[in-house]
Amino acid sequence: QVQLVESGGGLVQAGGSLRLSCTASGSIPRVPVMGWYRQAPGKQRDLIADITYSGSANYVDSVQGRFTISRDNAKNTVYLQMNSLKPEDTAVYYCNLALTSPALRPIRSWGQGTQVTVAS
């Protein structure tokens, strides 16, 4: 059973930074794609960034240039460095695994997520 555990969220002022981490534990093969998603109150969960096993990253326009995704394949861990945070970035952030990029079809159960709140 694969478990996804996200961490690193918190409350930050607009313009601040946070670094999220997500580790996939359990028996998993080489993971082609790892992605970060977020769900704001009353909205659907959306993919915001993903990264292939070789390190090729993709971002949605709203976070391009502010967020950086990276991964440590040996640790089955994906990171999200978030800079220049805006109030509209407030959401619960999740990670998941996928077979292809963009990671629009996650293949594992969702973890608990980590709350990011950006105060104006």
Image (tube, rainbow, N blue to C red):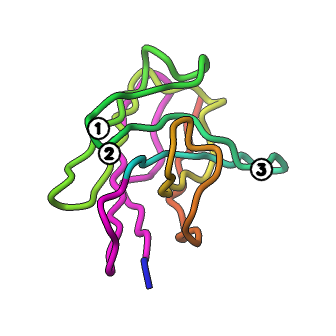
Helix, strand or loop under label 1: strand
Q: Residue at x 47, y 26 (%)?
A: 58
Residue beneath disc 1? 70
| Dot 3 alpha-carbon crowd within 10 angstroms: few under 14, some 14 to 19, many 20 or more | few
State which region is magenta: 3-31
Q: Amino acid at mark 3?
A: Pro
Dot 2 or dot 1, earlier in sequence: 1
**Contact check, label 2 and label 1, Cβ < 8 Å:** yes
Residue at 47% in and 57% down: 97
Q: What residue is pinned by disc 2?
A: 79
Q: Is residue 35 above or below residue 2?
A: above
Which quadrant of the figure contains the N terminus? bottom left
Say which quadrant the C terminus sits in: top right
Left or right side of 107 for 85 = left
Residue 41 got which mark?
A: 3
Q: Position of residue 5 (x, y in %)?
A: 41, 69
